Amino acid sequence: MRRVLVIVGILLGPCLAPTQPGQAGNVECVKDGGFSAMPAQDDTDITALMRAARDGEINDIEKLLKHGVDVNAMDSSGWTALIYASARGDPKSVKLLLKANADANAKDEGGYTALMAAAQYGHDSIVKLLLSGGADVNAVTNDGRTAIGLAAKSRRSQIGEILKKAGAQQPPAKPGPPIPSSVKSSGTQPVLLNSPMPNYTQRARDGGVQGVVHLRVLIGADGTVKRARVLIGLPSGLSYQAIEAALRLLFKPATMNGQPVAFWKNVIVEFRLR
């Protein structure tokens, strides 16, 4: 019998939520990681096609498209099935969606596109597919970011070259006002206190499914996780096991001016069969 070793890790930068002490709702989160903040909820607002694209369930994508589901439906953040598939980096999913007339230039509420998702996560083959499918190489987000800018920020030089050859132009940077030192030192980030073990589903064990699930979680002022949203998933039910594990994470809460506050953070849950 194979041993299962499951590791829970914290990934990427946080964004401090300007809420009142003890309050977790109505959080306006600074964008980080190149994508707009995910809504304060789980995945109940996404469609079956989005779930399939997010988790790499190719057979489900094919079946759903044959049944004529809305390929361009958006969740509450404006993510489409194509954005989920592009962030995941699955060429077959992207090809199926583009063939079904998925809008390669659909934008989420922050103005991010599937091409930006592929550039941010380093999927050069997806970048090429999207460009051939009509993606606007110079699309700009609400705050002035572009696919080539996101690629550069993530040190994806190869993707940057692909985008340049496709005509990408980096808009001039807009310097912001300096941040006073008093503001820089007024907040602290949450500190992880435990590492709950996610469960492997039998289907995932039998299929040898391994990899990581990327989530965005809202850490309350009491240090518990209030909401979890999958950005990039795994098939065979592992995305839902990752959500369950994320909801059991405990933190020393973030603070602002000495008071505990709610805090959005990106996390990963890694599944490995050993």
Image (tube, rainbow, N blue to C red):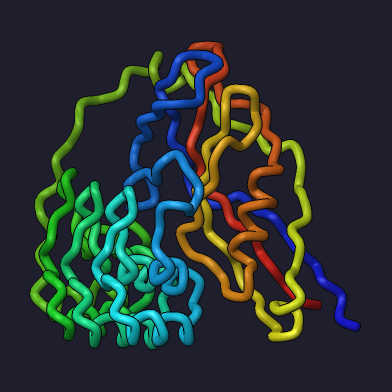
The residue depicted at 55 percent of the width and 30 percent of the height is 189
Q: Is residue 45 visible?
A: yes
- Residue at x-position 18% and y-position 72%: 103
- x 31%, y 74%: residue: 69
Front residue of 115 and 43? 43
Query: Residue 230, how many percent across, how many down?
Result: 50, 56
Give the image location of residue 217, x and y in percent. 53, 43
* Relative vertical location of residue 194 with respect to residue 213 in this rendering, above or below: above
Q: Is residue 235 above or below residue 173?
A: below
Q: Residue furthest front?
A: 67
Q: Quadrant of the N terminus?
A: bottom right
Q: Is residue 115 in sight in this rendering? A: no
> Residue 143 sits in which quadrant?
top left
- Residue 21 relative to residue 201: left or right: left
Comparing 98 with 70, the one in front is: 70
Q: Horizontal placement of 31 versus 237: left or right?
A: left
Residue 174 higher or lower than 180, as above or below:
below
